[in-house]
Image: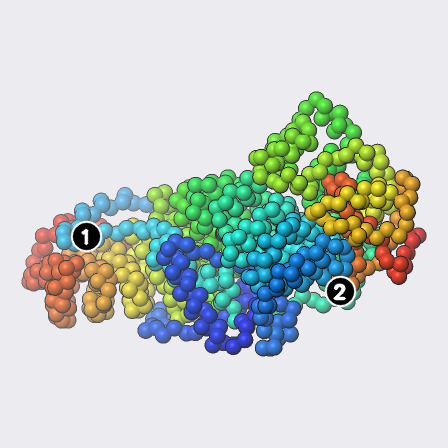
Amino acid sequence: MWGRRGRWAGPGGAEELRARRREREAALRRARRQEQLVSKRLLREDSAAAEGGRDGAETVPDPLSEDEVLELLRGMQRGSEDRKRSLSRLRRALQNKDTQQKFVRLDGSIRTLVGLFTSSLADVQMEAARCLHELSHSSDPAVAEACLPATSYLLTYLSGHSVEFTELCLYTLGNLVVESEAVRKQLLPQGIIPVLASCIQSPHEAVLEGLGYVLSQLLQAKEAPAEIVPLVLDSVLPQHMLRLVCSGLKAGTGAAVEFAWCLHYIVCSHTADAALLSLGALPALATLLLDLASETPPDAPEGLELLICPVLRCLSNLLAGDTGCQGQIRDERLLVALFLILQSFLQQHPFIVQEGLWLLNNLTADEPFFCSALLALDLLPALLQLLPCSPMAAALVLTVLCNIAEKGPALCQQLHQALPLLLPALALPDPQAVGQGLELLHLLFLHCPEVAADFIRQGGQRALEQHQSSPELQERARALLDLAGQPAGASTTGPCHGTVSAFP
Amino acid sequence: MPTAPHRLPERVRRMRSPPAPRAVAMLPLPPGLRRRLREGPPPPPAPPRAPPAPPAPPAPPFAFTPRRLRLGLHHPLLEDGDVHRHLYLQGVLTSLAEVAEGPKVSEFSCHISGCCQVFDTLEGYEHHYNTLHRNVCSFCKRSFPSARLLDVHILEWHDSLFQIMAEKQNMYKCLVEGCVEKFKSSKDRKDHLVTAHLYPADFRFDRPRKAKSGPWHVSSPAKDGASVPMDVSQETSEQFQVDPMETGPSENMEIPRPPASPGPTTPEKWFYKSSSSMNRLNVAGPSADPWGTPLATSLQPDSVPLIPTL
């Protein structure tokens, strides 16, 4: 299990850790913007770090010389004592990228390593597997791809029963999968999907988490929607993934996280909606959200956001499909759950706010039920409180309010009370958010003429005049000023005035 | 087992990320909200009334219509969440993760009669057991990585009916899970594995049965359950065909005894420890037919006593 192994931060402690994290974050953002976001996972036993305390800090070993690597290889090719010892030394040495490169360039090195990997001696096999794993994790494609001769065996061993060994094979495969399309073009005909489909019935959490990792890597591939998702949908994988995600609170949260991301990638492929909906994904995920909200204490334990985030995304994207499934989850507790979650993660993980608001938009856009429920549950103040979180959050909050206002006068009346809080929204720096604010005012003025008068009374005219010179806002600001300029009670000539729906 | 309602991976429970300055501290949620979650499912929704007439499009310059948003993989709104996910994958979210050690056990030995390997961790024992004892052919004692490969082996090596039927129909199954193809010969199957499934030509678990070490020769009087070594005689006569994948030069083959005549072997025990510094186990080259993995026929240096079985 991933949690069994420690990963030490290295010397320098917390400050260095933070600096490293910031660097990594910047690199990840850059990669994502180029649509090349790829990461690998490393399983490494730190028997030294297990001592605890700074002295256990794991440092990357220095590179070996060519001769030293060659000697290790010869040791592996001889028998007994030598072999095991050389393998252990090699494993440690392979933490260094330079040594990795030297090793794979040696004649016969991989062949020998794979031979030991298929040995009947359990501990030799395990040590060889660890060496392969180090190689698979390399950022140098030449090193990672050198592991290709091992893939048929990695797959064969997945049907074994040794949890630790299977887990290692899975993470190694997952690292290789993400290396290149060429690797995947080998793994798919070798039968990786059917093997994973068998493996997903394992009862071991560690195995399931590793399996989820492999799948998540496969499903992120560029060719996944065309080549991989159909194979996955054809297998028993989707129903098991859904099951494991939804039971993730009680056991196997690590695995649930992985499979939730898998589901997200599948949903994004646009070809899987019908299949997932027929498995009951929408109500299942909605129920999971309720469970997550009720189990999460106000100061949320770290890590749950990794599960909540993809669940929110799946729900939002499934709702946005053309399948007319929105009626399946008409449950006001969903709103309660959503706001409790937003509250829990507001401070530490603000990205949850904008993703949660996205879901809220998809719930309220076409469903008067959720619009009235939001107001009836008295969630409006909390919603407005989210305005300053970020520009995207502000735009989404105002969009949700528009969704509500658009449903007619009865709901507009209830928004009327929020008017004082809307005025500051017009002064936000982000033009997209302000634009939504203007749309909202338009809807309010349309359905409830008295709002216009109130708006002017509260100094709204100034707020609108500020935008007269902004190209994307000026027309609408002008139009609102005109609307508001009419005396209260005069009939507006907006076409929407005639479509008054009856609301309970 | 965890006592908390949910169990997070060890590493994430210890995360400490620097608190980001935010304008919002708490949401003004109405009291008693959490309680509503536990109140059970809501009453079934009212029967759907006729949907209201779709509203007329907004008058320009206003353009708002409610729209459900479908966001693709690379949408900017999802960037922060993705970055967080990848920081997790890269292990950067961990801070001072402790290693949750497994329960410590004192040394114990494998309980399979005939095997005396000793362990000091449960994982080590589990792996040993699964590699050597779990999927073992009761005829020839070879062990296999999975029940499936074992079944195929027994069928093809030890089932006389198979041989008869194979003359008339395609009996050699493809080894790849999910592929239902069958072939009339072992060679045809191998060709299929290589061309259709991109398997290596020397895939270790697909070596053809050689005639001379067919099922009729492998008749060691095995004690039940004991994975005794292969016919030492057969092995020794072929040991020096070095399989480059498995062994190097033959100097690792320590053979203190001359080859015995073909026939039943004497089951013997060898004592060795599994911990890294003390493993003296040799691998007898699978240069014979490593269709399965023959058990180690390690012949120890003289200093270790050979303990005959009872």
Where is residue A264? Give x, y as percent: 44, 51
Q: Nearer the viewer, residue B46 or A178?
A: A178
Report how far apart the C-alphas of labels 1 and 2 lie in the structure: 75 Å
Q: Is residue A320 left or right of residue A109?
A: left
- Count of numbered tags: 2
Give the structural element (helix, strand or loop) at label 1: loop
Give the structural element (helix, strand or loop) at label 2: helix
Q: Which residue is drawn at the image coordinates 90% and 50% (left, top)? A: B257
Where is residue A451? Give x, y as percent: 15, 63
Label 2 marks a residue whose chain is B
Q: Amino acid at mark 1?
A: Ala
Q: Amino acid at mark 2?
A: Ser
- Inspect this view and state whether residue A481 appears: yes
Q: Nearer the viewer, residue A389 or B283?
A: B283
Q: Is residue A74 left or right of residue A428?
A: right
Q: Which residue is drawn at the image coordinates 10% and 60% (left, top)? A: A478
Quadrant containing the N terminus of chain A in the rendered view? bottom right
First along the sequence among labels 1 and 2: 1
Q: Residues within 10 Å of mark 1 (few under 14, many from 20)?
A: few
Colour option used: rainbow
Where is residue B103? Give x, y as percent: 69, 67
Q: Are marks 1 and 2 on the same chain?
A: yes
Mark 2 lies on residue: B277
Mark 1 lies on residue: B63
Relative vertical location of residue B223 with respect to residue B12 in this rendering, above or below: above
Q: Nearer the viewer, residue A442 or B262?
A: B262
Q: Residue furthest right?
A: B310
Mark toward the viewer: 1 or 2:
2
Where is residue B272? Give x, y as percent: 82, 59
Q: Residues within 10 Å of mark 2 (few under 14, many from 20)?
A: few
